[in-house]
Every structure is written in structure tokens, then in C-alpha cells.
Amino acid sequence: MELTYQINKDVIEISETVMETDVEFEIRVLAEDKWAGMKKIQKFFEEDRVYTDVLFYAYENHRFRVIVRKDYYVDFILALMKYRLVESAVWS
Amino acid sequence: MEQQAIWAIGIFLVIYALIISEKIHRTIVAMIGGLLMVGLGIVDQETALHHIDFNTLGLLIGMMIIVSITADTGLFKFIAIWAAKKSKGNPVSILIALALITAVASAFLDNVTTVLLMVPVTFSITRQLRVPPIPFLLTQIIASNVGGTATLIGDPPNIMIGSAVKELTFMSFISNLAPIAVIVLIVYVPIFILLFRKQIQTTPALTKSIMDMDEKELIADSKLLRKCLAVLGLTILGFFLHQSLHLESATVALAGAFILLLLTGEHMMETAFTKVEWTTIFFFVGLFVLVSGLVETGVIAKLAAQAIELTNGDPVATSLLILWLSAIASAFLDNIPFVATMIPMIQEMGNMGVSNLEPLWWSLALGACLGGNGSLIGASANLIVAGMAGKEGHPIKFMKYLKYGFPLMILSIVISSFYVYFRYLM
């Protein structure tokens, strides 16, 4: 089973690259009101007990590069879902 | 030997063996040892309390509170990424920059706190560059122990020595130990480059990804950061001036901590207090009482007499004996109980007529702090980094560490031997 998700292109731009042990996301938050949500996700993963689960790299213009360990892929997508940065997620 | 002294030695040896075996948490073991000393009447409660060095405890608690609040601002991540960008994203330059940041931070914060702050950001940078984190972690362990040697507040052995010997001020630690710490680091840097440069190659694209980062985004709370920097600056200034102000270092650290809590508000207090390492604090309490049993029964005085007999009271031989013994012992044993035992022994040597104790104190500090680099179990910071690395799938094995750490530790003790000899004994 694979988790797929849908986004609102007015809210966020996401692209994924699958690597050997992780998935790299290029993310740009377009909606100003969703930026706080993204920062909360960053804070959540930075303060949990696993240091390399989800790593955030901030760039200008609300852009993020996020390296997600494959075993934390679902956790990350669900965190995006929680803060409505993705619209829906389904197992397919 | 009196019956009480035999009991004290027996309890001390059993407790020491249990601490080394790591079968039971060292804090529980040390506290039980201390309680046995009181419970069996080897020292009475009043004397035991008198032996607990509240200056060491207050200094540790104060600094832990200040650092825990400052860490929440994102300052340490900001510094690491800023340094990585200044290094043009070059992994070798970043390795050296992070090691130097660790050394400087360890001089003013305790080593464990420093590595707890540095390791997560190291994982982050190395993952982005797709280079193995182990060379970075090894150099940071080694740098933290060298940096911690430089000041009174850098490493628990120095805190304990500074607290026990009132003449050794914050400034005297800096003027006597910072030069040798800098020399050792200068010698280590080219060795680090030679040892690790081939293991940490990256691509221009990944280098660029570091250069494009916006480190300002890492500052989580700039208002809180300003308050923390002001208090941290004042606290460090207070350490420099503590003797002129007739204040103990613990008073300075606790004043800093509670002024910061006053400025940040009550809501930070609960979190800050939960981040104080109470296990370390009680470990110290147990140890102070445990060693008091040896002091009060005259065991330490006997050991000091034997050490003087062994070296004929010769200051060169005594200093070098303490330096090398402390280094080898600290490489394989916890340096905190070792120093707790050595302090009363050196004080006793003073009572027995050894006139110049200064080289002995610096030898003890250098041996105990730098000796921590000798093996993976030599210092708490080493174990903390190894634990964090292992949890993230990058185990640092005992033998792998020993291959790098032990020769580097021996090199630093050789340099320190010359330093102690030429500076204090010639």
C-alpha cells in the first residue's frame, strides 16, 4: 500500500525525489497563512527524539528542502495533512 | 588501620567498581555509597553535608538553566549553518569549523550540553552534503574535551578543582589552561584534516545547497535570543570578575539563570527546570559524601603520604605522576569520581609540606580533562555522542574510537608534560 496525497496548488508547491534511504522534498509555501503550520511541523520533528527522521533546510521565499527518512514518510505527510498543507491523503 | 577506615575503603571500592561496570545507573550507585557512609556511621550527617560542594552544584544548575533556555532560540543551529556557509560548503572546512565551535562552546558551557546542541545540527549538515557523520562526530568529541579544559566552567573536573581551591579563579584557569588547550587544538587541526579528508567528499551541487540556505530562518525567537545573549554575556563577565566581586562562581551562574527566568517569565521556568540534569547533580552529591568517608577516616592522608614517598616530594616527578595517572585513569574511568578522590589527596600533600601545589592542580586538570579523549568511555560527552550516533544508525564502536582517540590523547599529554615542566617546574 502506498500513501498518495493531493495538494492545493495555490497553497503549496511540492516535488519529491526518491533516494536510496530517504525522500527529498522541495517545498514552497505559497499561502502566507500556512507558513506558521510549516514552521510548527519543523519544530515538531526537530524536537522529537529522532534526529534524522525529517531534516529541514530553509531557503529564501518560504522555500524548504526537506529530507525525510523512508520510515518517516507517512509521519511527514500526515503532519502536512494536520496543518492543511495537503488537502487529502489516501492509501492506494 | 582503624575499622572505620577499612569499611570506608571497602564501600568506596565496591561503589567505584559498580560505577565502572555501568550495570546500575551511576547516580543510584553513588548515592547509595554516600548513604552507606552516613548510615554506617563512618561520617555523621553534619560532616557529610559539609563535604557536599554546593558551589559545584550551583554552578552546574545555573549554567544548565541558561543553556536550556538559549538552545530554544535556535542560536546554536544558526552559528553552525553560518559557519558552514563561511566555509563555502567545503566538508573539510566545515569539519574544522564545527570542531572549533564545539571547542569554544565547551569552554563556556559544559561538554555534554555542547555536544547535545552540536550533534543534531551535524547530522543535518552531513545529510545535506551526503557525507558520513562519523568524522564530524569524532572531531567534535575530541574538540569538546580539549575546549572544556580551557576554563573553570568548561569541564566538571575543572569546576570541582576551582571550587575546592579558592585561589584558583576563573582568570587563573584561563591564563594557565587556555594556552595549552589552544596549542593542542592547533596541533590537532592538521591531523583531523589528514585523517578524514578522503572520507568526506561531496559534489558541487550539494555544496551549493548549503550556500543557498537562509540561516536567519533558524532563529526561532529573536526577542528571547536578545535576552539570552545579554544574560549569557553578563554571566561570563561575572565569571571573569568573580574574585574582585567577592562572589563564588555558583552565585554568578545562579544569578544569571534567575535573572534570565525573571526576564523570560514563569512559563519558561518549568521547562528550564526539567532540562536540568538532576541525575548528574545527585551523582556529584553521592560522590562528595562517598569521598568524605575516605577523608574523615584518614585514608586520603595515607595515600598522599605514599605518593610523596614514591616521588620523594620532587615537584617534577609528582606533577608528571599526577598528569599521566589522571590521563590514563580518566581515559578508562569516569573522571569525576577520580578527581573527587584526587582533590583531597593534593590538599593533604599541601598539609604535609609540599609548598607549591599549583603545578599539581594544573596537572590534575589537564590529565583529567584531556584524558577523557583516550577512549569512548573516558568522558560523558563521548558516550552521549556515541549513543546519539548509534540511535541514528551510525554506531561509533569502542575500538574504532580508541584508534583515533587514544593516540591523540597521548599526544596531548606529551605536549602538556612539556608545558607543565617549562611553565611551572623549570
Image (spheres, coloured by chain):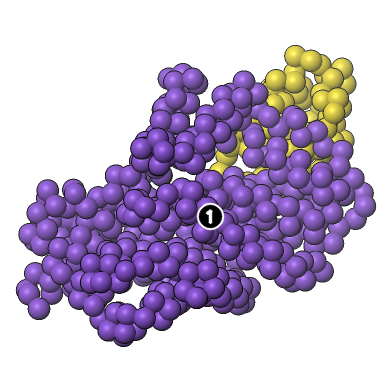
Residue flagged by tag 1: what amino acid is it? Ser
- Farthest residue in the top direction? A33
Which residue appears farthest toward the right when viewing the image? B204
The location of residue B73, given as percent across then percent down, is: 61, 30
Q: Give the chain ID for the purple colour.
A: B
Q: Is residue B286 visible?
A: yes
Determine which residue is flagged by label 1: B175
Label 1: element kind: helix
B241 sits to left or right of B121 = left
Q: Which one of the lettered chains is coloured yellow?
A: A
Q: Residue at x 87, y 17 (%)?
A: A10
Task: Work out whether residue B364 or residue B97 is closer to the camera in this orientation and state it.
Answer: B364
Camera-side residue of B329 and A23: B329
Tell me which chain the residue with mark 1 is part of: B
Residue B210's spot in the image, x, y percent?
83, 44
Name the residue: 69% across, 63% down. B186
Q: Residue at x 47, y 53 (%)?
A: B172
